[in-house]
Image (cartoon, grey):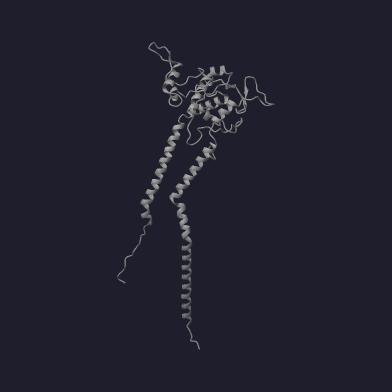
Amino acid sequence: MLPRVPAGALRKAGTVVGTQSTVGARLFQVRFASSTSAPASAFQSFVNSRATLAASALFTVGSVAWYTQLYGTLPFLGEVHASAAADEGLHPPAYPWSHKGIFDTFDHASIRRGFQVYREVCSSCHSLDRIAWRNLVGVSHTADEAREAAEEVEYTDGPDDNGEMFQRPGKLSDYLPPPYPNEEAARAANGGALPPDLSLIVKARHGGADYIFSLLTGYVDPPAGIEIREGLNYNPYFPGGAIAMARNLFDGVVEYEDGTPGTASQMAKDVAVFLNWASEPEHDERKKIGLKAVILFSTLTLISLYVKRFKWAPLKNRKLFYNPPVNKGH
């Protein structure tokens, strides 16, 4: 015969069992949470680490630089040109220029030949206001050659002691002379059309040097159905197709000093390279400084990461323990 157990004892036993089961469930949940949160916390720390952020930033900058180098424009941004790509005119093909690469510089022999083409052909109508004779020194000519070429031109200077203007030979500090004294004279000599200054023409036209080369070699007869009024010429690369400038480059027009065959395509290529240099004379130096900057900042970045890891690793890995004071009164 089983002894009777008071109801109060049963209730106490049930409370104890329920408390133990609740504690066990909580412990299980805590253990489960700690076991599952370890990979999550490791992933979170990896994502939030500075090295990951730096690597992501470098990857983004490198991707943008690669895209810009490959396509010539920034991704997701419109091009900044005087004439947009949507304007009328055949889009010029991309030519493999020798200075197009990241580590490539201008062909200075081509710049010298292009300057000869400009002086003998282009300078009769187009000015080059932003280029002085001294800019040619060390690029395409020696100082004596540039000085001799400058002295062939007469410049108006003064006033002298009598208050009168006088003519003098050119100096290295003088800028290349314009073909016309003013804009009105230029329009009058070209049937109302104003020949543009060529100092920044490569930057001012969509396609750059590709456009210049295609325009100079792209003169053809107008196709059927297209009429060109008198005094204009058909060129599919020019916006609208009708251009006032006639074709000026023919085989043998310029006899190069270095013996290079003076074909029309060779002259167009050389003058396009020269005008590209005129638009950005700092091109070569900019690439040299950029390469040095990349090497310098890459080295400083690696040193900074090493110093940061060396200095902060002991601080981040240390453990802090708190020992509460023991109350000896109990």
The part of the image, by quadrant, that contains residue 85 is: top right
Q: Residue 90 versus residue 258: which sits nearer the camera?
A: 258
Residue shown at 37% from the left, 52% from the top:
312
Residue 226 percent location from the top left of the image: 67, 26
Name, please, the residue furthest toward the front. 259
212 w.r.t. 303: above or below: above
249 w.r.t. 97: above or below: above
Residue 207 percent location from the top left of the image: 56, 32
Q: Residue 257 versus residue 65: which sits nearer the camera?
A: 257
38 w.r.t. 205: above or below: below
The part of the image, by quadrant, that contains residue 143 is: top left
Residue 55 percent location from the top left of the image: 46, 47
**Number of numbered discs:** 0
Inspect this view and state whether residue 127 appears: no
Name, please, the residue furthest toward the right. 225
Q: Residue 81 versus residue 325: which sits nearer the camera?
A: 81
Residue shown at 43% from the left, 35% from the top:
289
Residue shown at 44% from the left, 49% from the top:
51
Name, please, the residue furthest toward the top. 162
In the rendered image, the quadrant that contains the C terminus is: bottom left
Residue shown at 45% from the left, 35% from the top:
287
Inspect this view and state whether residue 298 appears: yes
